[in-house]
Amino acid sequence: SRRIIAITGTKGKTTTTRLIGDILDRAGFNPVVAGNLGVSGLDHLAAIGPDTWVVLELSSFQLDSLAIERPRPFIAVLTSLYPDHLDVYGTFESYRNAKARLFQFQEAINVAVVNGTSAECRKLARQVRSRVRFFGPDTLPADWPLSLLGEHNRANAGAALVVAEAVGIARETAREAIGRFTAIAGRLELVAEHGGVCF
């Protein structure tokens, strides 16, 4: 688990996971990026050795299935926390507890990267034993290029920057990767412009 970076949250998981993967790739880490984004980590087992960085997007359902494994990623990221999947979990507290499982078994040597602009995320952060590092839209320097739209995506990029710094990647490398990152299909993706209106 010393080279596992795991990302969860209600929204922002995929973008943040891909951003982190791109930064690690640009830094020469050659990561495996998998999980709840249509890529199974099991398909990459042959490529994963003791020195391989693995970046995993994990949904609450995947965290439920990992409960018996006592997951302890080196870095755990919480992008956001809103009431969701209540048809399955019944209450927000139950859903929140599923997300909290990602941090439950972390120790002081580990890092929790948490959305500091969310009261619910800060509340969860008070319960972890790992080193907490907060992020938000202002974490990303104002003069860094970012093609993604929305304050939430500035926050996602901020989370990726905090992760990059936690693993010792130079800020300039992170800046280049973030600047080159383009929207993921279906997530505020610019598809056309007509008559001065962006779609």
Image (cartoon, rainbow, N blue to C red):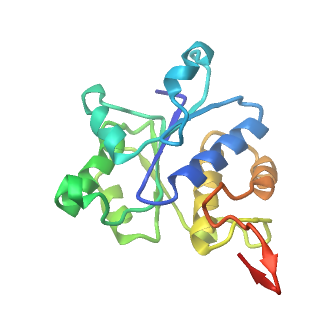
Q: Residue 12: horizontal and vertical position, in percent?
A: 52, 58
**Can residue 94 be seen in the rendering of this structure?**
no
In the rendered image, residue 186, in percent from the top left (x then y), is placed at: 61, 59
Residue 165 lies, with reference to residue 194, above or below; the image says above
Image quadrant for the C terminus?
Answer: bottom right
Q: Residue at x 71, y 43 (%)?
A: 22
189 lies left or right of 155: right
Please report the residue visible at 65 percent of the width from the left and 54 percent of the height from the top: 161
- Asked whether, in this view, residue 119 is left or right of residue 97, the answer is right
Query: Looking at the image, which is closer to me, 173 or 25?
Result: 25
Residue 61 in sight: yes
Q: As displayed, is residue 40 above or below residue 111?
A: above
Quick one: 35 or 172, which is closer to the camera?
35
Residue 7 falls left or right of residue 139 = left
- Image-quadrant location for residue 189: bottom right
Q: Looking at the image, how many numbered discs can be counted on the residues?
A: 0
Q: Is residue 7 above or below residue 70?
A: below
What residue is rendered at 74% in x and 66% in y?
191
Can you give x and y, in whole percent of width and height, for residue 185 in the image? 65, 55
The residue at the far front in this view is 194
Residue 8, x across and y down, in percent: 43, 49
Q: Residue furthest left?
A: 90
Residue at 20% over, 54% down: 89
